[in-house]
Amino acid sequence: MDLANFLREHLHLCCCATALFIAAAAFPYLVPKPAVKPLQNSFLVLAFPLVGVSAALDAITDIAGGKVNIHVLMALAAFASVFMGNALEGGLLLAMFNLAHIAEEFFTSRSMIDVKELKENYPDSALVLNLDDDNLPNVSDLSYRSIPVHDVEVGSYILVTTGEAVPVDCEVFHGSATITIEHLTGEIKPLEAKAGDRIPGGARNLDGRMIVKVLKTWKESTLSRIVQLTEEAQLNKPKLQRWLDEFGEQYSKVVVVLSVAIAVLGPFLFKWPFISTAVCRGSIYRALGLMVAASPCALAVAPLAYATAVSSCARKGILLKGGQVLDALASCHTVAFDKTGTLTTGGLMFKAIEPIYGHIIGNKKTNFTSCCVPNCEVEALAVAAAMEKGTTHPIGRAVVDHSIGKDLPSVSVESFEYFPGKGLIATLNSAESGTRGGKMLKASLGSIEFITSLCKSEVESRKITAAVNASSYGTDFVHAALSVDEKVTLIHLEDRPRPGVLDVISELKDKAKVRVMMLTGDHKLSAWRVANAVGINEVYFSLKPEDKLNHVKRISGDMGGGLIMVGEGINDAPALAAATVGIVLAHRASATAIAVADVLLLQDNISGVPFSIAKARQTTSLVKQNVALALTCIILASLPSVLGFLPLWLTVLLHEGGTLLVCLNSIRALNDPSWSWGQDLRNLIGKLKSKLALLRHNATSSTIQTAPL
C-alpha cells in the first residue's frame, strides 16, 4: 500500500479519534459538572473502537506469532488503563501512537527512492524496426512493430520519438535528440545524443527523433540494474540494524518482565498502592508507564539513516549493494585507483605502429628471411585489428577504430586464447600475405612483458626489451606489442587523464584525509606521467591481476584499515573482490567487475568516490546520534514514569516524540554530505545570511513601491 492510500485510509480515523479524546478531556472545563461524565463516556464509546480494534488485532497477531514488540506493549498498556478506569488515557495513548506511526511512515517513505515510480514510467513496449536484407533498417521508409520491452534482443533497431524513454541501453544509429538522465544519474544538464553516442536505458527523449541499436537486454540495462540493486540494497541490512532487530525482540520481553515486577513488587518495596489513589499513583499505573516509555520504537527506527543514504546515493547515480557498504566505506583509510579507463579517459588514441624486432630495416636484414607483404605496418595493423575485433578493452578498441576505412589485407582468426590482464594468442589465416600463400600465422598481442615471456630464449627477450627502450617514439605513450611469427611490432597509443580527476584526488587527500595510490599494469613512465598529472604520489606499475590482488591484501593488512579499490576492467576483478569496498564505473566495467563490486558509479567519472566516502561517514555519524537520541528519550521518559511524576499520556508523548526526533535526524541523510561540522556550520550561516539579505531586499522593495510619489 503506498503512502497516499495509507494516509487516506487511516489518517482521518486517527484524527477523528484524537479529536474525540481531546474533547472528552476538555469537558470538565467546558460543560456543567453533572453533564461531564455522561458526555465523556459517550465520546469514549465513539472514539475507542476507531483505534482500539486495530490495536487489538495487531497485538493478537504478533502474540500468536510468538512476538512481543511495540504494538503488543502499547495494546497492553492501553487496555490495562481501560480496566483500571482510565479509559481516556488509554484511548489517547493509542490515538497518539497511531498518529506518530503515520508520521514515521511518511518520513520512511521520504527516505526510500521511489522504485515503483521508475517502473511505472518505464515503457512496456518498444518500436522495433524491420530490417532489410543487409540487416540494417531502411531509414527512408520505416516499418516497425511493437513488442514487449523484455523481448527486445541485442542488435535490434528501435525508433525513439519525442517524449519517449529509451527502453534499453543503446547506441544512436541515425538521427539526434536532446535527452535527460537526471532521474538516473543526477546529471541535471540535458545531453545531446547523436550518431555513435551510447545512451543508458531509461533516458528520456526531450526533443528529436532517433533510431538506436540495442546493446543490452532489459535485464542488463541501466534502469533495470538501478531498480534491482536498490531493492536488494534496501533488503541487505547493515550489521547494526540486524543486531537491533534481534535485540528488539529480547528487549521487549525484558520490558514486559520489568513492568510486571514493578506492578507486583512496588507495593512491598516502596509502599505504593496497587491501584492509583488521589494521593499516589499505583504500581500498576507506573508499570504501564514503564511499558510505554521503554518500548524500543525509537531504537527500531535508528537505522533508518542507512535506507535514506542508499536512496540519496541512488539519486546521484551511485548504486550501493546494501547499507552495509556504508559502514565499510566509513572504515576505509586508503583508496587505490586503476589507471586506464578509471583515472584516464580509457578512450586510447592510436598514435603510431613501429616495427622493432625481426624485420628487414632498409637494406639491412635481421635474422629472419622474410617480411610482411605489402609492408610490415599494414599487415601488423590488419593482424591486430582481426585479433581485437569485438573487444571491449581500451587498447583493442583503439586499434579496431584506427583500422576502419583502411585498405588492409584479409586476416581471419582460426583459434584464440585470452589471458586476462596480459594479452592474447591466436592462430591466423592471412590469405593475402603473398610469400606465405595463405600460410597459418602464429600471433600474440599484449604487454611487453607478455610478449617477452613467450620468447624461446633469454637473449631474444632481452633484445626485444632493448628495442622497446630504444623506440624512436620514446616511452611516454601507452604500449602494446604484436608478435607475428617472431617479428615484433610496437603499437603506440595515447591516454589522457579524465577532466576533473585532479580535483577528485585533491579532495580525497585534503578533505577525506585518505591515502591515495595507483595500481596499474602499464609500464613505469606511462604510469608516472598520468600520476603526476592528477596529483598521485604513490604508484605501483607493471602489475598483473594477481599482483594487484596481492597489493590490495598487503596494503589492507599493513594499514590496519579498510581499502577502497576503484577500477573497471576484467583484470581488476580479483582486486575489487578482495578490497574492503570495490567501486566500478558501470558504463565501462566488465560483467565480472560489476558482479564483484560493492558500488556502481553510473556517471562516467569518478566524482562519486569522494561523495560516497563523505556520505558513508555522515550516515554512520547519524546512526550513532540516533541510538544516543533513542536511549536518552527512553531514560528521560522511563524514570519519571516509574517514579510517578508523569501521567500516561505525557509518557506516550515523550516516547513518540523521541521516535519522531530519530526519524527527522535520519532524513538529514538526504542532504549532501560535508567533511566536517565546521563546514556544516558555515553552510548554515551562509544560508541564513542569504535569506536575511533576501528579506531585507524584499522589505526595501516593498517600502519603495508604497512610498508616495
Image: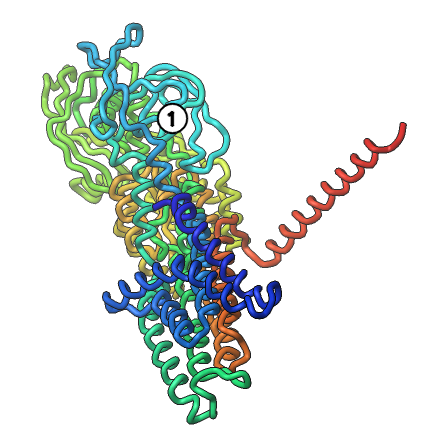
Task: Classify residue 355 as left or right of residue 647.
Answer: left
Residue at x-position 31% and y-position 61%: 58
Return the residue nearer the eye: 378 or 138: 138
Please identify the quadrant where the C terminus is shown.
top right
- Based on the displayed image, in which of its 4 quarters is residue 262 positioned? bottom left
Residue at x-position 28% and y-position 52%: 577
Which residue ends up furthest to the front in the rendered image?
A: 34
Residue kind at label 1, given as amino acid type: Lys
Which residue ends up furthest to the right in the rendered image?
A: 709
Return the residue nearer the eye: 161 or 275: 275
**Is 211 located above or below residue 57 in the figure?**
above
Return the residue nearer the eye: 117 or 7: 7
**Residue 617, can we see it?**
no
Residue at x-position 48% and y-position 81%: 642
Residue at x-position 28% and y-position 65%: 60
**Is 429 located above or below residue 235 in the figure?**
above
- Based on the displayed image, in which of its 4 quarters is residue 8 positioned? top left
Q: Position of residue 650 (x, y in %)?
A: 53, 70
The residue that label 1 is drawn on is 351
Dot 1: what SS?
strand
Q: Position of residue 144 (x, y in %)?
A: 25, 14
**Residue 225, can we see it?**
yes
* Scheme of image coloration: rainbow
Task: Classify residue 239 as left or right of residue 281.
Answer: left
**Is 514 located above or below residue 427 in the figure?**
below
